[in-house]
Amino acid sequence: MLVTCQQMQEIERAAFDRGVSAALLMDQAGCGIAKAVSQFYPEPGTLILYLGSGNNAGDALVAARELQKIGWQVVARLSVPIEKMKPLPRGHLEQLADVMKPISPDSYQRPLVQLDGLLGIGSTGEMRPNLRALAAEMNALRLEHQAFTVAMDLPSGLDADTGQPSPDGVVADLTVTVAYAKRGLVADAATHHVGRLALLPLPDLVAQSSSRESYLLTPEIIRTWLPRRAFDFHKGQAGRVGILAGSCGFLGAAIFSCGGALRAGAGLVTLLVKEDVYPLLAVRTPPEVMVQIVKDYREVLEMRFDALAIGPGLGFDHEQEILAVIHSATAPAVIDADALTMVAKERTVLVKTAPRLLTPHPGEMARLMPALTGRSRVDQAEAAAQTLAGHTLLLKGARTVIATDREATLFNTTGHPGMATGGMGDVLTGVCAALIAQGISPHHSAGIGAWVCGRAAEPAALEMAQIAVLPTDVIRYLGPAFRELDGSAHFAI
């Protein structure tokens, strides 16, 4: 559920009226933020606090208290003298040891994490000079010393309702928004400043919501969409996935899609290819995949599949055959890559068909729905979903948006810039097809797929640099990502 600042303030007032204390909420928020930092950096390093005068600073100080207990070195940078801070944050600051002692960047213990506790959601307008100077210091440390910036609730300088950033606003790598996501956090203009977005639920802050609200994808929501398998479950019940992918020069796309489908739990995965690429793909696909030759892709219409994945690396030599499958297949299907380009020229193939999940990147979206170019990403996705009534649209990007007519719009939270490499979308296509084959709706399958692929990329970036993460690494970490959804993980955001 996305809220405005006014709605959030009303939610907090209602909690206070019920006897919930600000101190309790601060403690819950700070402890959750500390766990979020530990999820990304399990080994302690240096934590720099950037503190304003309000309770946002208190959340940061509680987080610092918890991290200091497990070995983090803590340094505090204040925007006001300590006596001008509100009582709660001032009390937490006074309890921390040696945090006012300045240290040189050369002596920072790695990893270097900085917490943005300068401003909360109530701030509007331009930042004051003292706050602007500290925000600039944070941004410089991020660029020059590779500091990882964590914003609490929202990055300082960002309008929580509109998402418009101040020119001098904090650029965060991770924003942990408390209780409910603020509407501005998912605005297009906010994405660069917000970074990875995580929701920290607080049980004492509750609001009424409807089924048509927009939501951030979180483990708490997603795990309710995954069916629990009976002990006597067998591969026939896990779904039969048919993948139409791969052509000369584009073999990797087929391999990535197959890998994604396998790791997302498909019972049987069949890759359907033309004879010219069969010998090349048969020896390169995972051994669990069946590779089958088709003389005409329309043969698929006579085969039994619970879901299809159509498009990755397919090429355009057999366009009419592919369009016929998209139009006539009775199984739900994920339409991606080259198949999307075909559909953009023949949108009528989507009329009166089984459910289709379309997964365009921005360039493909411009071809698919040129009339929507220039509108915000969420407007594009929702308008396209209305036009494609009955089908689902997953608009890929740094803040993936998923829309289906008459369903709640979903915003993905996971992932990082290291995923900007060819093949990531092919993995997603396979994952989504496998989930649909298991009986999960295309809308929910798109949400799960986007979240787990992004989440799988995150531990891969801990093992190596973000820039080095490949689609094969994402496939390798899909298992741990799904584990966080089955309740096995101690903490996940």
Image: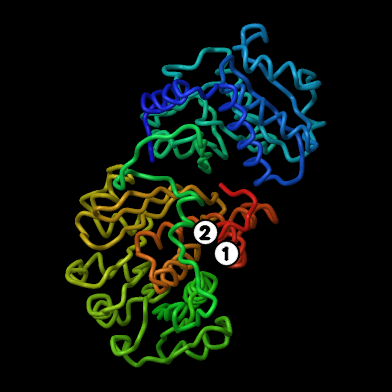
State whether residue 2 is above or below residue 485: above
* Residue 299 appears in the picture as rendered: yes
Please name whichever residue, 370 or 463, is drawn nearer the observer in this view of the structure. Answer: 463
Q: Distance between the residues labelled 2 and 1?
A: 6 Å
Q: Residue at coordinates 55% horizontally, 18% vertically from top-left?
A: 132
Mark 1: amino acid: Leu
Q: Position of residue 483 (x, y in %)?
A: 59, 61
Q: As drawn, is 354 to the left or to the right of 116? A: left
Q: Residue at coordinates 50% horizontally, 62% vertically from top-left?
A: 424
- Disc 1 designates what residue? 478
Q: Residue at coordinates 67% horizontally, 36% vertically from top-left?
A: 147
Disc marking residue 452: 2
Residue 77 found in image quarter: top right
Q: Position of residue 23 (x, y in %)?
A: 59, 22
Mark 2: amino acid: Val
Q: As drawn, is 43 to the left or to the right of 33? A: right
State whether residue 409 is above or below residue 473: above
State whether residue 82 is above or below residue 156: above
Q: Where is residue 300 in the image (x, y as percent from the top left)?
A: 32, 86
Q: Where is residue 1 in the image (x, y as percent from the top left)?
A: 38, 41
Please name whichever residue, 460 or 36, is drawn nearer the observer in this view of the structure. Answer: 36
Q: As drawn, is 167 to the left or to the right of 140? A: left
Task: Tell me, yes or no, whether the two marked residues, 2 and 1, touch with CB atoms within 8 Å.
Answer: yes
Q: Say which label, 2 or 1, has the lower sequence index.
A: 2
Residue 358 found in image quarter: bottom left
